[in-house]
Image: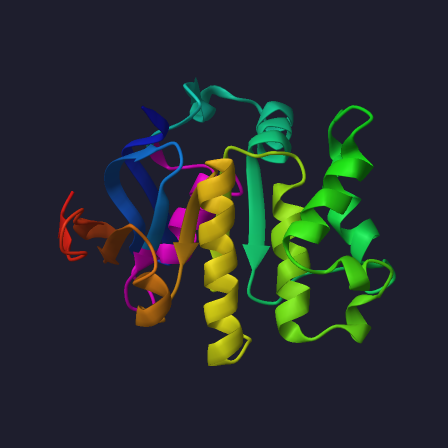
């Protein structure tokens, strides 16, 4: 069953007299627990697509359903509330607050939702799962790039979102660290059945996903899933 559905989703920009079709009538179903890589050249619409999925942008036309809610019909406050509850974000540059330690950074999204008394316990559990218990009181300046990205991944999951969006999450780390981060994402995806949509230029990282969507000029060029028998990509 789809927990995210795009129906003719469109985002246009005007640049003088020119119309930029950043996302151009995309229709997709994303099922719960999928691990998807969105690929394509610069300017293909990948980041705009991610921003639409994360409710950071409003579409020009079309619909985006998250857990059967038509987000196009939500006002700004309800969109912000749904974003806080349903969507976790991981960025290339980590976006950690330097004045907070690991635990405090992971707990930060809890300030924006009523998450009950288990918020701190949930954060501590996630820090353990990403392998940073011994760094729980450290500040970002005391961490490596890979460790900071692990903190960002834990932070993205603290509110138990339906959807985690990652924009070039391995772009600022070395190849070995990138591989470790991808294995972590695969494990969390399997264990929590959280839907992951990852934008990347790295073919090795994209190859770890079970579904690859390639964009060109704001449209879906190919949509392929990993075959069950031979591990090759086949049309979705």
Residue 54 in view in this figure: no
Quarter of the image holding residue 91? bottom right
Where is residue 90? Give x, y as percent.
57, 54
Magenta part of the protein: which range?
38-61
Q: Quadrant of the C terminus?
A: top left
Image coordinates for residue 68, horizontal then vertical, percent: 41, 19
Task: Say which residue appears at 30% left-offset and 61% top-offset.
Answer: 39
Task: Answer with left or right where residue 182 lies relative to residue 2.
Answer: right
Q: Give the tally of numbered discs.
A: 0
Q: Is residue 42 magenta?
A: yes
Q: How is the image coloured?
A: rainbow
Q: Is residue 54 magenta?
A: yes
**What is the residue that sits farthest to the front in this orientation?**
229
**Residue 198 drawn at (x, y percent):** 42, 54
Residue 182, above or below 62: below
Question: Looking at the picture, how far across and down is residue 194, in whole percent?
Answer: 48, 38
193 over 208 or under it: above or below: above
Q: Residue at x 57, y 49 (%)?
A: 89
Please state which of residues 165 and 79 is positioned toward the viewer in this rendering: 165
Q: In this rendering, would 171 be left or right of 100? A: left
Residue 99 horizontal side relative to residue 1, left or right:
right
The image shows residue 24, relative to residue 95, as above or below, that is above
Q: Nearer the viewer, residue 128 or 149?
A: 128
Let me know if residue 119 appears in the view: yes
Quarter of the picture holding the N terminus: top left
**Horizontal placement of 213 versus 56: left or right?**
left
Which quarter of the picture shows residue 160? Answer: top right
Q: Residue at x 25, y 56 (%)?
A: 215
């Amino acid at each position: 069953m789809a927990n995210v559905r795009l129906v003719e989703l469109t985002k246009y920009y005007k640049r003088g007299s020119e119309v930029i079709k950043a996302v151009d009538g995309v229709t997709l179903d994303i099922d719960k627990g999928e691990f998807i890589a969105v690929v394509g050249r610069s300017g293909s619409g990948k980041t705009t697509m991610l921003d639409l999925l994360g409710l950071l942008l409003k579409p020009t036309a079309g619909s985006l359903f998250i857990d059967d809610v038509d987000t196009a019909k939500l006002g700004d406050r309800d969109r912000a509330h749904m974003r806080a509850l349903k969507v976790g974000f991981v960025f290339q540059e980590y976006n950690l607050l330097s004045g907070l330690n690991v635990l405090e950074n992971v707990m930060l999204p809890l300030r924006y939702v009523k998450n009950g008394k288990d918020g701190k316990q949930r954060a501590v559990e996630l820090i353990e799962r990403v392998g940073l218990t011994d760094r729980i009181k450290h500040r970002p300046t005391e961490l490596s790039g890979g460790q900071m990205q692990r903190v960002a991944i834990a932070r993205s999951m603290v509110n138990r979102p339906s959807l985690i969006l990652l924009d070039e999450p391995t772009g600022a780390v070395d190849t070995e660290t990138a591989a470790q981060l991808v294995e972590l994402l695969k494990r969390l995806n399997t264990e929590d059945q959280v839907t992951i949509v990852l934008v990347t230029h790295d073919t090795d990282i994209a190859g770890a996903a079970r579904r690859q969507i390639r964009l060109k000029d704001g449209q879906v060029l190919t949509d392929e899933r990993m075959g069950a028998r031979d591990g090759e990509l086949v049309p979705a």
